[in-house]
Structure formats: structure tokens, C-alpha cells
Amino acid sequence: MSQPKLAVVGGRTWGHMHLRALSQFARDGHGELAALVDLDTDILEQRAVEFGMATYSDLEAMLDEVQPDGVTIATPDHLHRDIAVTCLERGIHVLVEKPMDVTVDGCRQMIRSADDNGCLLQVDFMKRKDPYHVDLEQRIRNGQLGDVQYGYSWMEDRIEVPRDWLPAWVSSSDPAWFLGVHVFDLIRWLVRSDVTAVSASASTGKLVSIGIDTYDAVQVKLVFDSGASFAVDVAWHLPDANEAVVNQGVKVVGKEGWMIVDSQDRGARGCLSGPVGAAVGTESRSDGASMFTPNLGLFLQRTDLWNNPVYAGYGIESIQDFAFNVSFLTNGGAIDELGSYPSGRDGLEATKITTAVHDSIEQGGALVHLERD
């Protein structure tokens, strides 16, 4: 059985998670983590020490020398398209972080490139892998809630996310692009229906006051062609003292029942002194004691009997799902034989929704209808 050769483009915050996932995939004997591309030489040095793969500062050079079967992309959002198209036109399968692209036309170009070259184009909508969301989706499919009528979802980050994780490009993003696309895809997947219309408003003030020109929060109403509607709140300006990096959850109400998933409070909570640790990004709350609620569903690190790191959680599984798909394809499988996965079309729909959100904000909250492809 042929083992796929995999590479990562972008080694910072979430790219670190890609490297964890693919290094675990390789340690388990399923493939090879062959290379990392990043423009930051310090990041390349740090990641090479941790994971042992080859490093490059030039994408084309890596593609020429390594010739990977699959590439995962964890760069700033506005760089996704060009990197993905470059790989797809070489016949390389691609996993791209959300949002797939920040323009509808860019998403369509990526889909065309994948189709024209017979490549897999997968989007890392990891919320679909959260076991609580999987359980909720199964209960909806089994009819335990009846026809879905309405719901509510929220995702709110501490201010460290825009301030400390994304300093170079934060003003090119906002809560709808960084967080909303997660929620929009999750609800589409749960409801099994496309969004037909959007209305939205936004709040500003806190981030602008510290020199970051972007929204603090975005409020959205989604209307689906099934007749369901959802309210969505996304924000990234919660105080540093907030006990969780992200507060998040979803409520779904149907004709026969309802269910709430609190995706942050999973049963562990404490007040700890010193750095409390984080799966991604930074953890600066180290002066004195602070409250903490870990999300071990997202990411858990332990060691095996030989003291090697072992990574688990839906943040890992979502990336490894792509690696297993590439393995299937490199061993003679066909894309239309793959099971369910977040596709380029799913990425396109999330971008269409988010673009409509911004159109609505600019039009004072007007109802914006989405075009169907």
C-alpha cells in the first residue's frame, strides 16, 4: 500500500495544529509529513526541531523537490486561493482552512482547478467532527427533533485572538470571516439546507480603541430554503480575564423537540495559578490565579509508553480526515467513492453567506438574497 507524502503551508497558530495532526498520522504508519513552507525563518526552525520535516520559504521550490501528494493550507485567509490553485494545477490534493477564500469568485476558481485536474479540494470545517455536534446531527437525521424550525448559535473569542494571534492581518478579517464561517457551515450541515437570505449588523469600538480597525461583533439572521431560520452572534473582543478562549454553542429547535450543545463548558473548570496552557495561540494570563475551562474535545495531548506525544480531538481528526482521503486516492480510489467530507462547494456556500453578511451590514441590515450556483 502506497503511503501519501504530505506538506503544510503556514506553520503559525493553526498551522501548528496541522503539523501535530499530520505528524501523528505519520507516527501511526499511515504516511509521511514531508515539508513545511513558511516565510518566517524562526517558525521554520522551531517546527523543524519539534517535527523533523524539511522546511522551505518558497512554495514552488517545495513542490518541485518534495512532490507531495497532498498539501494543507493554514495561511492568512486572503492567501488561500493562490496557494491552493498552484497546488491543484500540479495535480496535488488540497485541504484549505476556512474560509476557503474571501471572495465568491476565488472559491469558484479553486473548485474549477480541482475539477479540471481531478483533485480533492477539502475545507477544514472542524466543527463537523465535534462529537457533540455529530450526536446532534444524528438526532436530527433520526427525527428526534422533528423538522428544524429555528435555532441560535454563538461563538465569542477573547480579545487575545485578534490582538495577539493575527497582528499582521487582523484588519483584513473580522468576526464573520474568522468565526462566522465555522457557524454558518455547522448550521448548513445540521439543517441539510442552503441559506437563501441574510440580514446582519455589526458593533465596533473596543478593537478600534486599541488600534485594530475591525468589527468587535457581528449579529446575523440566516433564512434557509427549508423554512428554518437561525440567529448567530460572533465576537472577538471578550476581556482577557474571560475564563475560556472561546465561548461557543448551538441551540436547535424542531417541531418535536430541541437540543442545546454548549461546546465550551464540557464539565471541567478551575481556578489555576501560572500559565494554564492552550492548544493554539497564546496564553498570557500568568500573573496570579485565573479561571479556566479547557476544551479537551478540541485538542488533547498526552504521551505514549515511549514518551512520544499523542494528539487527539476534533481539531486533529478533521485534518487527519483529509490525510486518510489522500491515502485512499493515491491507492487507486476515486473522489466520488469518498465518504462525506467538507467540499469545495461547502466552502463556496460559507463564503457566499459571509459575503452577504457584509453586504447587509453595509446596507444597514437589509435582507440580502443569495444567488444559487
Image (cartoon, rainbow, N blue to C red):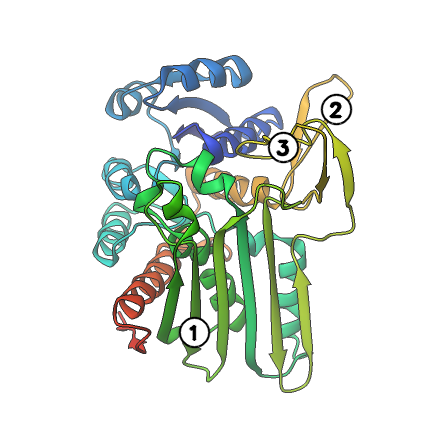
Label 2, residues with CA under 10 Å away: few <14, some 14-19, many ≥20: few
279 and 171: which is toward the camera = 171
Q: Is residue 190 left or right of residue 111?
A: right
Task: State the image coordinates of residue 257 (x, y, percent, origin top left).
Answer: 69, 81
Residue in the image at 34% along x and 18% along y: 56
Residue furthest to the front in view is 209
Can you say whether 312 is above or below 233 in the image?
above
> Looking at the rendered structure, which numbered label has been put on residue 222?
1
Quarter occupied by residue 169: top left
Residue in the image at 76% along x and 34% along y: 272
Report the residue marked by disc 3.
285
Does label 1 or label 3 sit earlier along the sequence? 1
**Gap between marks 2 and 3 measured at Cα:** 29 Å
**Gap between marks 1 and 3 measured at Cα:** 36 Å
Does label 1 or label 2 sit earlier along the sequence? 1
Element type at mark 1: strand
Q: Is residue 348 left or right of residue 252?
A: left
Can you say whether 112 is above or below 96 in the image?
below
**Kind of residue sitting beneath label 1:** Leu
**Kind of residue sitting beneath label 3:** Arg
